[in-house]
Amino acid sequence: MKKRVVITGIGVISPLGLGHQEFWNNLIQGKSGLSPITSLDVSNYPCKKAGEVSGLRPADYLGDKGLKYLTKGTKFLACATKLALEDAGLNGNNNLPQHAGIVVGSALGNYSQTTDYTYDILRYGPEKLLPMDSYDVALNSSINFASVFFKLKGPSRTVSSGFTSSTDALGNAFNLIKSGRETLLISGGVEQISLDSYLIFLMQRLLAGSQDSEPEISTPFDRKRNGFILSEGSYVFILEELESARLRGAKIYAEITGYGTSYMGSRRYSIEERVKKAAKAMALTLEDAGLEKESLELICANGNSSKLVDLVEARAINAFLGERSKEVMVSSIKSQSGECYGASGAMQMTSCVLAMHNSTIPPHTNYQKPDPECELNLVSQEKIEKNVKNAMVNSLDYTGNCSCLLLEKKSW
Amino acid sequence: MRRVVVTGLGLVTSVGANVRESWDALLRGKDGTGEITSFDTSMYKVHRACEVKKLNSNCHPAGKNRYTVYECLYASTKEALGDSGLIGYKDLDPERIGISVGTLAGELTIFESELRDHPQRKSDGFSMDVVLSYPPMTLSTQLAEQFGIEGPNIILINACSSGNHALCWAFDILQEGKVDIMVVGGSDVVPQTEFTHFHNLKALAPERCQPFDKNRQGLVVGAGAGVLILETLESAKRRGANIYAEMKGYGLSSDGYHMTAPHPQGEGAIRAMTLALDSSELSYRDIDYISAHGTGTPLNDKMETLALKTVFQDKAQDIPCSSVKSMIGHTMGAASAIESVVCCLVIKKGAIPPTINYETKDPECDIDCVPNQARELEVDFALNNSFAFGGNNASIIFGRV
């Protein structure tokens, strides 16, 4: 007997605010979380903007002890997890079910701290380094810390599949509960801006404004788009098996009804083939949920302002929707939030769940010049009041997967 | 639910460049430990590791092998695909074959060697070689590219239980019927960074790895890769594939206790093994062989013994339970994948590799660790344990088909 999976808590640490309320309020007001980078010296480089988390005081969430050796990303994840648990009414020592687990997606994890440690070894010599210097520098140590800090006894897993990492993590958590293996999982994504992540994307010319003549602006599906603007943060959900959530009288935001993925990364694929693969992931997701296309009302798109990926996604959405493409609304929030790479799927899902919850779709800011190759039923510059029952979240990694999640608003 | 079987194996270890060489060496009790050659260890108190010295394939036609994580992964994948009869096999839908791979630190050694050659600041930028190998995901996408695999593609990063996590992931989607075949593995080499991390935690043994020995002093870091072709029984039968074993079930858990030390009573380990037995619908009495996590650190081996006694009760001291880490070192993200390959070979070949370097009995580790000599034994069910740093546990059970 397949179990049903519901979302009972949301925790957000983002450039658009701390906590899902602030994130949502800023989002629907069309505010931008993107501003000149302060945490890195980028004076020698062309791209100056990013979506950085500001004003976070981890001690307010986690207490004073043991924070000294934690990386920025580890703090993001632990704080977002704390907020999600509080939101789900599971804060406190004895409230968490005995075998809660954690499944989180991160494309780069704490890798920048791993390489910082490498620099230190080569610069100062290993004997100068203390054991605590490598306390939190493993790729997956943010998730380890959360599992230790919240005393989780269920699985802890770090999923790394590039830009679809958190979507694949959420999809995996969904499947683990659906199959009856687990009853409560903390799931989402985390990324942090570092010189490493900035350079890795800059040197591949994926960032907006990485070529002189182009403006540094995030404007998904717009003809003037020329790359994404990097952002950071952590977006965490409490996923629970429906019956156990109802038994404890939990507030339920929405149900996850489907997950699908397909690989579109091969260099052998033409754009047409990638479009086909991405459309297939969307169709698989719908099929997984047993939903008819006619019932789908909203797509929370990957749309990150990248020239190629937006094109592939727009064409895939149209291929997938067919006749329905005139009616299904497409929302992208990355003009405001930036591209939170491995955590983007969880970020979009946050927006998606809150849009359904508040019957409002956030605006599509910065959009000026329609691209005839990306014709979609996009949300306007103003937010839209609309009751949405079924919505899809898309994640695309041009060198990897296209992964999607399907959500349904429920009232119990 | 579909049944999931193993139809191909691939290995790269410090004692052999393929399954046959590695298996022969493991049964002979060969120690793969040697002086580290890939970086200067004069500043360390420990100078030894189990490095890979030979690869049978070269995935860069132009260049020579650099013994990267990807090269080890590629070599063992090629072997496993060949072993399962999938190379050149025509009647396949590439979208029904997926990849899941575990690693600890990705291609850190590429970054390290560049840094050694050109000392610089990070802000000076990276070479494209580093840029393109930096995200861990590139391991599995390169594999997909090179072998034309077009199904689900994932990297799991779970420290030293990464390989088992990758197997569990694959098992789930095969059981569900989302794919027919999964290429599953783990790969890691010996980055100076990880070596330093373990060194400064005083987790490294100075000379050799001695799991369950009273005088064990720690782990020895190792390089290698293990790859298994997991397949639904249906698909394996359809193409008449050779079957090594069936993956019966698994258990995942966390200690939720400490970033580096295991839970002293092995709470998480007990739960992982118990869940593995439950999901396999087996009793502890059914297990004939245990591939121990057995790192040779004082804490792990003591904890693992305690946990084994809790789960296996009256049988705890009778079930042979060896650690190949005594021979090939702790290969981190690859370890549990390699040990899963070992479990399949144990079932298929009816022999158990020993725990070498065993000299002095430890009353706190009073299990049958198959000391120093391989043993012939018919094994129907084998349990593979992996209990990673951070209390990240994954146990898997393989059975005879």
Image (tube, rainbow, N blue to C red):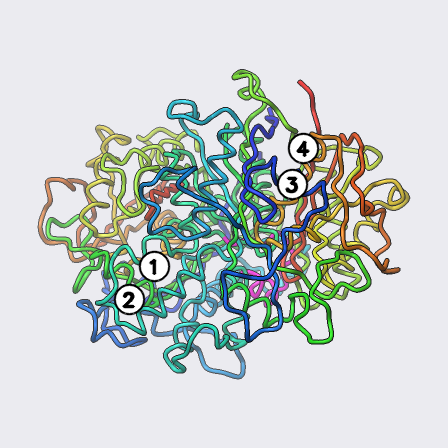
Mark linked to residue B50 = 2
Give the residue type that dot 3 points to. Met
Please tell me whether mark 3 or mark 2 is closer to you in this view. 3
**Dot 2: within a 10 Å radius of its alpha carbon, few (fewer than 14), some, or many (20 or more) residues?**
many
Check the image and report above or below for A20 versus B200: above
Could one spot residue B397 in this view of the protein?
no
Q: Which residue is mark 3?
A: A349
Circle 2/circle 1 CB separation < 8 Å: yes
Q: Are marks 1 and 3 on the same chain?
A: no
x and y, in percent, of residue B370 in the image: 20, 48
Along the viewing direction, whichever of A16 and A150 lies nearer the viewer:
A16
Looking at the rendered structure, the secondary structure element under dot 3 is helix
Q: What is the distance, in whole Å, between disc 2 and disc 4 at their CAs? A: 47 Å
Q: At 46% across and 42% down in the image, what residue appears?
A: B247
Q: Which residues are magenta?
A: B140-155
**In terms of image quadrants, where is residue B38?**
bottom left
Along the viewing direction, whichever of B151 and B4 lies nearer the viewer:
B151
